[in-house]
Image: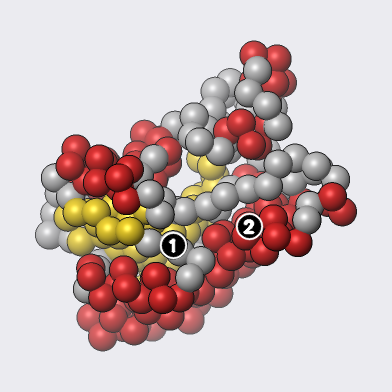
Amino acid sequence: MRLAGRTAIVTGGGSGFGAGIARKFASEGATVWVADINLDAARAIAQEIDGKAVAVDVARNDSVAAMVSQTGPVDILVNNAGITHLPKPMEEVDEDEFDRVLAVNAKSVYLTARHMVPLMKAAGRGAILNVASTAGISPRANLNWYNASKGWMITATQTMAVELAPFGIRVNALAPVAGETPLLASFMGEDTPEMRAKFLSTIPIGRFSTPEDMGNAACFLCSDEASMVTGVALPVDGGRVI
């Protein structure tokens, strides 16, 4: 029960890695707000873990403000919601795709900080976890603007960690490799046995990241066991970035 008595928000918590993090947090005693643009998905996970559901579009200031007004102060904020563009040459990504990727993956971290950091400062404590990607550490071709958004997230994590440490707030990131989530097909371009085999050949451990892997790593970084850990981007990737 490493998170007993804590309250957490997990954005994008209705599926994939976010659902895995929400499940783990609940199993360790936290009260979890499952936040998702798909309220039905959020409600399904919240019902499963005896948590609470809230609708949010993390790219919109008014929506993030409404989420925080509903949840109130929390001990843990997980910025997990994210999207990608399909693999293609960088100049073929249209402006709408670019804007959406940067809004969901980068602007969302700014917006949640605007509304949640003052509450954490007032409490004198807090843990923020940003779900980045191996793409932000070891980028590959044809996902250029997605890679850039995740690199931005890692730099933001480090800067936030330095600035917020005097207020008792720790900020870390996770860097998963692709996993069995709704984004897998988008990362690969198409979900076929051949594409999976090609992708898995780049991961020394030989499998994708799972929601359970992410939940375990997130729980450690957001618990008091990691009280001396801030500003890290922890790969959960089976050796992919080595």
Give the answer, above or below, for where 149 lies relative to 110.
Answer: above
The secondary element bearing badge 2 is classed as helix
Q: Is residue 88 visible?
A: yes
Give the answer, above or below, for where 118 lies relative to 59.
Answer: below
N-term-proximal mark, 2 vs 1: 1
The secondary element bearing badge 1 is classed as loop
Q: Is residue 138 visible?
A: no
Q: Is residue 153 left or right of residue 71?
A: right
Mark 2 near mark 1, Cβ–Cβ under 8 Å?
A: no
The label shown at residue 101 is: 2
- Residue 185: x and y, percent? 61, 31
Decide: few, some or many residues near mark 1? Use Cα within 10 Å; few <14, some 14-19, many ≥20. many
Label 2 amino acid?
Val
The label shown at residue 91 is: none
- Residue 175: x and y, percent? 55, 47
Of discs 2 and 1, which sits in the foreground? 1
Towards the viewer: 125 or 153: 153
- Residue to which mark 1 is pinned: 57
Towards the viewer: 228 or 216: 216
Q: Please identify the quarter of the rendering in which residue 203 is found.
A: top right
Q: Residue at x 69, y 55 (%)?
A: 97
Identify the coloring: secondary structure
